[in-house]
Image (cartoon, grey):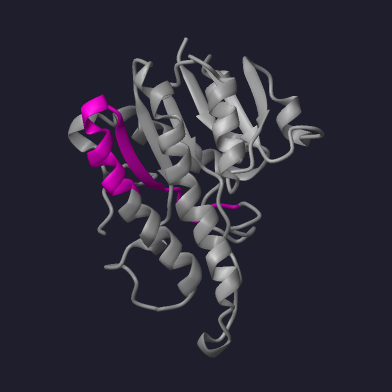
């Protein structure tokens, strides 16, 4: 039975990843900041362990890595993330809030990837996934809006591309995924696709990942995205 670990599992895309992988018979390590009173996550049936993890806290990350001991993780999905401030004028950017977004969206996925690399290396599939966004594509940025969020996703793409090179010797494959514009709390009810469609598509893209494609940036529909 393969094992998947998913951060930010208590709602939205993370919760749907838990549902679909559990239904497919995977062992699921679901993490969220507060594992008590997790609502819909507690209702999902399957082989699921729920662990507390504050992705912005290095101690919390290292503690969970130690607690999991020699558990092999086939797929690790860095899903937890934040959008940050919206609808601001450039002259009014809150740089402290910007740093909080960078901490969650950039530093945390790297910390988690490094802390759990030994667990990935013990597995058969050895896949490290980060839920990014096509808003992090420099080529596709023609509007210039949402600078805080865009910059965080461009940065995490660059960081994960570099991590892919560093993890190559351990045969850990890395990929960044754009989930689409999804009907979640972050995406809003007017978004293009449902969370079920998004996660179903991303799971297929995760399945297709191998070492030849490590460090790549893909859309949920299987198309490669420009940097």
Camera-nearest residue between 78 and 143: 78
The answer to which image quadrant residue 96 occupies is bottom right
Looking at the rendering, the stretch of residues picked out in magenta corresponds to 160-183
| Residue 150 image point, x, y percent | 43, 66
Question: Looking at the image, is 101 positioned above or below residue 46?
Answer: below
Work out which residue is located at the far top of the displayed protein and give it. Answer: 1
Question: Looking at the image, is 86 positioned above or below residue 41?
Answer: below
The answer to which image quadrant residue 34 occupies is top right
- Residue found 48% across the figure and 18% down from its top: 3
Residue 182 lies within the magenta run: yes
| Residue 179 image point, x, y percent | 45, 48
Is residue 134 visible from the viewing direction of this image?
Answer: no
| Residue 43 image point, x, y percent | 75, 26
- Residue found 28% across the figure and 48% down from its top: 161
Left or right of 78: which side holds 122? Answer: left
Question: Looking at the image, is 70 positioned above or below residue 198?
Answer: above
- Residue found 39% across the figure and 54% down from its top: 156
Camera-nearest residue between 185 and 27: 27
How many numbered discs? 0
Quadrant in which the C terminus appears: bottom left
- Residue found 56% across the figure and 20% down from its top: 68
Residue 114 lies within the magenta run: no
Left or right of 166: which side holds 144? Answer: right
């Amino acid at each position: 039975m393969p094992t998947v670990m998913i951060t930010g599992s208590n709602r939205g895309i993370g919760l749907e990843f838990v549902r679909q992988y559990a239904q497919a018979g995977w062992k699921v390590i679901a993490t969220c900041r507060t594992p008590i009173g997790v609502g819909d996550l507690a209702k999902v049936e399957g082989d699921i362990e729920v662990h507390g993890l504050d992705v912005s806290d290095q101690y919390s990350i290292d503690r969970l890595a130690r607690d999991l001991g020699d558990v092999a993780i086939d797929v690790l999905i860095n899903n937890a993330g934040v959008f940050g401030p919206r609808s601001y004028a450039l002259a009014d950017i809150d740089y402290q809030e910007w740093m909080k977004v960078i901490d969650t969206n950039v530093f945390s996925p790297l910390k988690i990837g490094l802390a759990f690399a030994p667990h990935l290396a013990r597995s058969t599939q050895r896949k490290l996934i980060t839920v990014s966004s096509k808003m992090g594509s420099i080529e596709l940025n023609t509007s210039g809006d949402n600078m805080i969020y865009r910059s965080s996703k461009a940065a995490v793409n660059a960081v994960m591309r570099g991590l892919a090179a560093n993890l190559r010797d351990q045969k850990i494959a890395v990929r960044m995924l754009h989930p689409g514009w999804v009907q979640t709390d972050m995406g809003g009810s007017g978004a293009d696709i449902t969370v079920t469609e998004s996660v179903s598509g991303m799971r297929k893209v995760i399945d297709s990942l191998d070492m030849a494609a490590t460090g790549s940036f893909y859309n949920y529909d299987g198309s490669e995205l420009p940097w």
